[in-house]
Amino acid sequence: MKYLPGSINPFIVTLLLLGLILMGSCKTYQYGYWGKLPGSEYSPVIEKDTASKMIQALTIKKQFLNSETLQLSNEIKEKVSSESPISMYTFNALFKNLHEQYEVDTIYHRLLQQSPDNSIRYQSKQALMESALNYKRAFQKNRFLRRTINRGDLAYGIPTNTLSQTQQFLWSDKTNRQYLVENEKDKKATHTIAGFILSNSVDNLHSYRYKTVYFLSKIFGQFAGQFHGKIDKKTNAMLLQSHLQEYDIVLQKSLTHLTEKFIPGYFGHVGVYLGNDLMIETPRSGVRICSTEEFSNGEIYLIVRPVNLSENQKQKIKTSLNSQMGKKYDFNFDSQSPDRIVCSDLVCLAYDYIDWQSKKRAGHFITSPDDIVRSLLDRPDFSFEMYINQGQFISKPDTAFIQELLKQK
């Protein structure tokens, strides 16, 4: 339906009204954008001199973090604009930065809520408004960044909707709105309260659609996962164990699982060996640590070994893998949204110094197990150690052999 010039689109009006209702039902923001922190009433009061020194130190730290935030934001915006995939290193850097930003913001919240001194509370609230405004400049105007951050990232302790809460704080009372108007020179629709409500409402509708696709895909995936042949996991694990070393990347193919028919490429699954007969993987139930036997759910395996890892690299890989525990399986198959992950994302996030290949499938960039293999083919710091096919071994398979494998389904 077309609307005459100057007429009002009822769809936009509906979104605005919905947004106003949602904002009106939200918590008050007198305690900052995260509300009253748990346990704050039992925390010891911070003296004014101590609080003043804390604020000075936090201001310096914020300047550094804000510079890093804008740099990461600009890098991601360029990638989104050119329709290029964003590296896992950048995603890790983004959420690590947000984690550190929120740690500082939490201290400001505690000062706002606990300090008996009016000047300290005033400075704390000003700092929170400045933080919220910096997030607005860095993230709020970019749809991809806004939605990705609001989905959160369990690995870095970022809950859902934190960005949305900071922006609602900017519009929560007259003082905050006046601060925004005086300090934000942008005259586009995102600068107005109507613009914020509209973008928030559109994001909510997108989130419902995203979750609906996730739900339907999950139902199909769980149903298809019931159909598979009998696999001798114990024997498979015995074949694997004698060849595995800590930090090995293990790719797997099942000849009998129906779900493998829907995974692009030759290999259908991948995990990382942690040592002591333990693997970490992301099956449909989510990220878990399991025994080698529980992992060995296929007939064909390829062991890829990182060579000469430094102690620092080992520690970072181990920390990253452990931090993913508790994440759900991503039935949206979107590697550019690390709130949920598939098996290959687990590897890519942990070994984020690799420039992992990915392809756009069904509107999302996704790195498949085959993409992991392709990304490592010409790297001297990785070795293809062993190929196992139903009890038959090929030690140190060459590049030509691996490339021929990847041509098969």
Image (cartoon, rainbow, N blue to C red):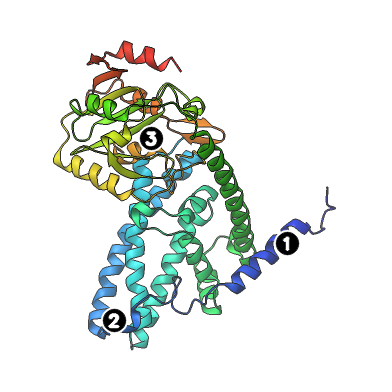
Precedes in sequence: disc 1 or disc 2: 1
Of all residues, the one furthest to the right in this rendering is 4
Q: Within 10 angstroms of label 2, few (less than 14), some, or many (20 or more) residues? A: few
Q: Give how far across and how far down residue 232 sits, in percent.
A: 33, 27
* Real-space Cα separation, disc 1 to disc 2, in angstroms: 44 Å
Q: Amino acid at mark 2?
A: Ser
Q: Which numbered marker is on residue 14? A: 1
Give above or below for 376 relative to 49: above
Please tell me whether mark 2 sits on a helix, a strand or a loop.
loop
Precedes in sequence: disc 3 or disc 2: 2
Precedes in sequence: disc 3 or disc 1: 1
Identify residue for label 3: 344
Q: Which numbered marker is on residue 43? A: 2
Are the residues tagged 1 and 2 within 8 Å (C-beta)? no
Please tell me whether mark 3 sits on a helix, a strand or a loop.
helix
Q: Where, by quadrant of the figure, is residue 273 drawn?
A: top left
Q: Which numbered marker is on residue 68? A: none
Q: Looking at the picture, tell me which residue is in the foreground, 132 or 409.
A: 409
